[in-house]
Image (tube, grey):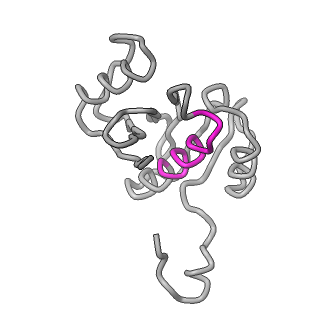
Amino acid sequence: MSVTQHLVHDSKDARLIHDKVTGLAGAYEHKDENFFFCLMDDGRYVGYSIALPQAQGRYLLSDMGLLEKYRQQGRMVSLLGYMLFELQDAGIHELLVDMSHVEASPEMDAFMASRNAVDFEGKKLLKTAAKKSRWRLFGRKSQA
């Protein structure tokens, strides 16, 4: 299994991925300001997440899904971490997470705690900038 994460820029691809993972044809309408992420396994679409603009510098995780066989493996945590990285790179400072779209797991709880998530309007608010890694604390560049 070779699972990779990607930021999708093409609206047709975003709709295709959403339809394949959810089985809901035509349910997603992509807009240029949206961020659409996908999770792939050996060239096959197995998951997605969508972030929509809210306020200045803040986006909302509006939807996230995985195929059944990929659930409860920490894949959502991995995809959420990747989203935060890409959003930070795009100049977005906060991600508001609607937890109804995120599968509950000890890994997700630990991730939220490690990112100092705070309750905000019934959702979890995450800063895109993470704490400094131990590599940066010692003056080394990250090995990611």
The residue sitting at 55% across, 30% down in the picture is 69
Residue 143 rendering spot, x and y as whole percentages: 47, 75
The residue sitting at 34% across, 35% down in the picture is 44
Q: Is residue 120 magenta?
A: no
Magenta portion: prevailing SS class: helix
The residue sitting at 47% across, 34% down in the picture is 49
Bounds of the magenta span? 71-83
The residue sitting at 72% across, 34% down in the picture is 104
> Would residue 1 be found to the left or right of residue 30 on screen?
right
Residue 70 rendering spot, x and y as whole percentages: 54, 34
> Would residue 11 be found to the left or right of residue 57 on screen?
left
Residue 135 rendering spot, x and y as whole percentages: 57, 81
> Which of 137 and 72 lies nearest the eye of the viewer?
72
Q: Is residue 81 above or below residue 27?
A: below
Q: Is residue 65 above or below residue 110?
A: above
> Would residue 119 be found to the left or right of residue 64 on screen?
right
Residue 71 rendering spot, x and y as whole percentages: 60, 33
Q: Is residue 127 above or below residue 137?
A: above
Q: Is residue 72 magenta?
A: yes
> Would residue 99 be found to the left or right of residue 28 on screen?
right
